[in-house]
Amino acid sequence: MNKLLTLAMFGIVNAALWLAHSAEADEPSTAWIVTHYNQFQLVTPTPIPVDPKIAAACTTSVKPVQLGGPHAESAISIYVNDIAGTALSTSSGFEPGAVIVKLKQRDEQHTRGRNAVGGMVKRDPGYDPSGGDWEYFYLEDGKLESGPLTSCAQCHAGAGKRDHVFASWIGASTLQQGSH
């Protein structure tokens, strides 16, 4: 009887872990993404320079912004999961679970620090209909902010025709039409 109970408990624990992992794969949390994004496909083999004004606007932090000088520049590397990669390479719509991550790289003397991680996760319909149902996240200085972040949603509204995704970097990416 003891062996049967042990086996049953083992089965329940494994089933719970499998379900948690499956849910994570379908609807990853932003906390999971910021620590595992490097497992996604890097689609920009060379970091892409970003205009200092755009880089300054793309943050949730209240630190002072430096728009000029030798340390104002930043570059981004884009990572996508398979769901987002398929949508970008086929010009289809983004399905729930699609993840796009932007690693912001700056030089070591930059006033805002060396790196930041930002991105977006497509959530189920109804999450934020006015924002295309995207959850935004931004990690800087160890502080993670996520949700329908106003600064992100307002900016990405300008890309509403492309499901709130800017893709000016797509030409510099490894994604090709029909490659997925």
Image: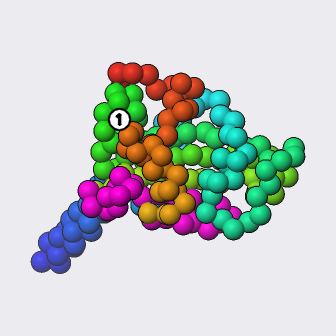
Q: Is residue 34 visible?
A: no
Residue 12, placed above or below residue 58: below
Q: Secondary structure at mark 1?
A: helix
Q: Is residue 67 visible?
A: yes
**Residue closest to the eye, 40 or 54:** 54
At 27% from the left edge and 61% from the top edge, which residue is drawn?
A: 126
* Residue 163 percent coordinates (x, y): 37, 44
**Residue closest to the eye, 31 or 10:** 31
User: For this view, does 98 lie left or right of residue 44?
Assistant: left
Which of the 4 image quadrants contains residue 147? bottom left
At 61% from the left edge and 46% from the top edge, which residue is drawn?
A: 103
Q: Which residues are magenta?
A: 125-147
Q: Is residue 71 magenta?
A: no
- According to the picture, the residue beneath numbered tag 1 turns out to be 87
Residue 69, placed above or below residue 64: above
Q: Amino acid at mark 1?
A: Ala
